[in-house]
Image: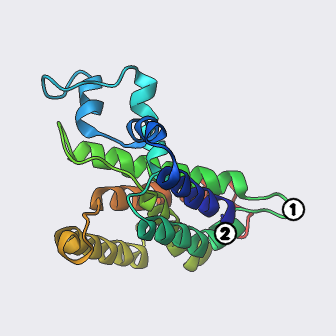
């Protein structure tokens, strides 16, 4: 998880200090733009420039996690990945078999889940999305399930209580973010990432009934 956190910081360093020509390449590739995505699917608003190919439209669903609009966001997400990811990684490890791949899958699915929920709620056009907060939210959800032990379930009272609290906090930040933080947040990416991460973690747990998580 430290490698992933380091990659996020490194990606931000590259973005900040790269020439303008690189910026012009990285931003269109990494920013998830709902209007262009839906136009690429043939169901968006008229007159919007679609992505050049289906692959180019799908890449930002995951690549957006490597872009951040400031140091605060990049450092915070990297820190959350380490804080919650440490236990998730350990729980997905079995004996000498590292849990690195399952950990990355949980993170990636969380990012994509958050991106997809952002797209659905921003149809046919809306604000662009960058940042790894969807992935961090998914790791947090997995961390919550781990706290309950082997019996932890997505529909358990404790998990649903945490989910409700998480939703309220995110909606509050969404409403007050521009005035308090100087920038908006995507509550959709956080909520979608939280649920996607929880479900992916549960799939791994169901497949490994003898593991220690």
Is 124 left or right of 65, judged from the image as shown? left
With respect to residue 57, does 178 lie above or below?
Answer: below
Is 65 left or right of 69, judged from the image as shown? right
Q: Which residue is mark 2?
A: 213
Q: Helix or strand or loop: what does disc 2 sit on? A: loop
Is 88 left or right of 57, judged from the image as shown? right
Determine the CA span between mark 2 and mark 1. 15 Å
Q: Which residue is mark 1?
A: 96
Q: Position of residue 60 (x, y in %)?
A: 42, 39
Q: Nearer the viewer, residue 67 or 190?
A: 67
Q: Position of residue 143 (x, y in %)?
A: 55, 72
Circle on res. 75:
none
- Looking at the rendering, which quadrant does residue 48 occupy? top left
Q: Position of residue 165 (x, y in %)?
A: 31, 78
Residue at image location 26% in from the left, 39% down from the top: 34
With respect to residue 29, does 103 lie above or below?
Answer: below
With respect to residue 159, does 63 lie above or below?
Answer: above
Q: Nearer the viewer, residue 28 or 101?
A: 28
Q: Position of residue 191 (x, y in %)?
A: 34, 61
Check contact, mark 2 vs mark 1: CB within 8 A: no
Q: Quadrant of the N terminus?
A: bottom right
Q: Helix or strand or loop: what does disc 1 sit on? A: loop
Say few, some or many: other residues with alpha carbon within 10 Å of mark 2 (under 14 / 14 to 19 / 20 or more).
Answer: many
Front position among marks 2 and 1: 1
Q: Earlier in the sequence, mark 2 or mark 1?
A: 1
With respect to residue 174, does 148 lie above or below?
Answer: below
Q: Quadrant of the C terminus?
A: bottom right
């Amino acid at each position: 998880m430290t490698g992933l956190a380091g990659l996020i910081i490194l990606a931000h360093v590259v973005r900040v200090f790269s020439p303008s020509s690189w910026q012009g390449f990285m931003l269109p590739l990494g920013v998830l733009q709902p209007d262009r995505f839906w136009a690429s699917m043939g169901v968006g608003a008229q007159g919007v420039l679609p992505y050049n190919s289906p692959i180019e439209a799908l890449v930002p669903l995951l690549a957006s996690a490597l872009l951040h609009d400031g140091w605060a966001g990049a450092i915070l997400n990297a820190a959350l990945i380490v804080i919650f990811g440490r236990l998730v990684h350990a729980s997905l490890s079995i004996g000498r078999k590292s849990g690195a791949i399952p950990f990355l899958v949980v993170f990636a699915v969380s990012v994509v889940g958050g991106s997809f929920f952002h797209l659905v709620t921003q149809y046919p056009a809306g604000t662009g999305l960058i940042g790894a907060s969807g992935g961090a939210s998914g790791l947090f959800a997995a961390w919550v399930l781990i706290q309950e032990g082997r019996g932890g379930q997505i529909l358990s009272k404790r998990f649903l209580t945490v989910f409700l609290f998480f939703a309220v906090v995110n909606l509050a930040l969404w409403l007050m973010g521009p005035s308090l933080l100087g920038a908006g947040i995507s509550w959709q990416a956080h909520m979608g990432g939280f649920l996607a991460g929880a479900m992916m973690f549960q799939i791994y747990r169901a497949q490994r009934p003898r593991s220690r998580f």
